[in-house]
Amino acid sequence: MKQHLAHIAIVVKDYDEAIDFYTKKLGFVLIEDTVLSEHKRWVLVAPKGSTECRLLLAKAANQQQELSIGNQTGGRVFLFLHTDDFWRDYEQYKNNDVKFVREPATEEYGTVAVFEDLYGNLWDLVEPVNK
């Protein structure tokens, strides 16, 4: 049996501002943007070259969901973005005004820094050690 994660939903305030952040600041690719109803769209973004897991940008539909925006994991790192060139991506993100909240460090598992998305969710940017 083979399984994989296809999509991870992230609650956003606005589809277009979220698309803009992920595609322009992080360099992700807009995979799909389909209108489902007057207030709902199916929006998928993914890092360039990613073939399996994508982010589903899900606009908050009620007050309870709005309270989760930017704090989907209670302040812990939410997503882990692996890269084949940490310094290339780190410098590009810094040039795109992505806010890093923990500066680069070399750990046993690789080079890592923590950044915030447009709503404050925490991400690890990681270049893993090849094993």
Image (cartoon, rainbow, N blue to C red):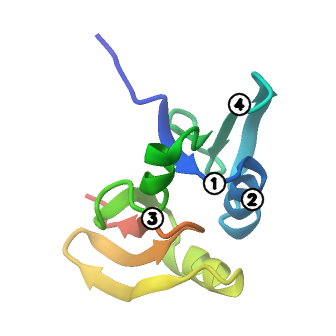
Q: Position of residue 123 (x, y in %)?
A: 42, 65
Q: Inspect the image, locate mark 4, and give the three-letter code of the amino acid beneath it.
A: Lys
Kind of element beneath mark 1: loop
- Residue corresponding to mark 2: 17
Q: Is residue 57 above or below residue 98?
A: above
Q: Are marks 1 and 2 in contact (CB under 8 Å)?
A: yes
Mark 3 and mark 2 lie on one chain; the one further toward the N terminus is 2
Whole-angstrom CA distance, mark 3 to mark 2, is 15 Å
Q: Are marks 1 and 4 in contact (CB under 8 Å)?
A: no
Whole-angstrom CA distance, mark 1 to mark 2, is 8 Å
Kind of element beneath mark 4: loop
Q: Which mark is residue 121?
A: 3
Q: Quadrant of the N terminus?
A: top left
Q: Are marks 4 and 2 in contact (CB under 8 Å)?
A: no
Q: Position of residue 68 (x, y in %)?
A: 42, 53
* Numbered-mark total: 4
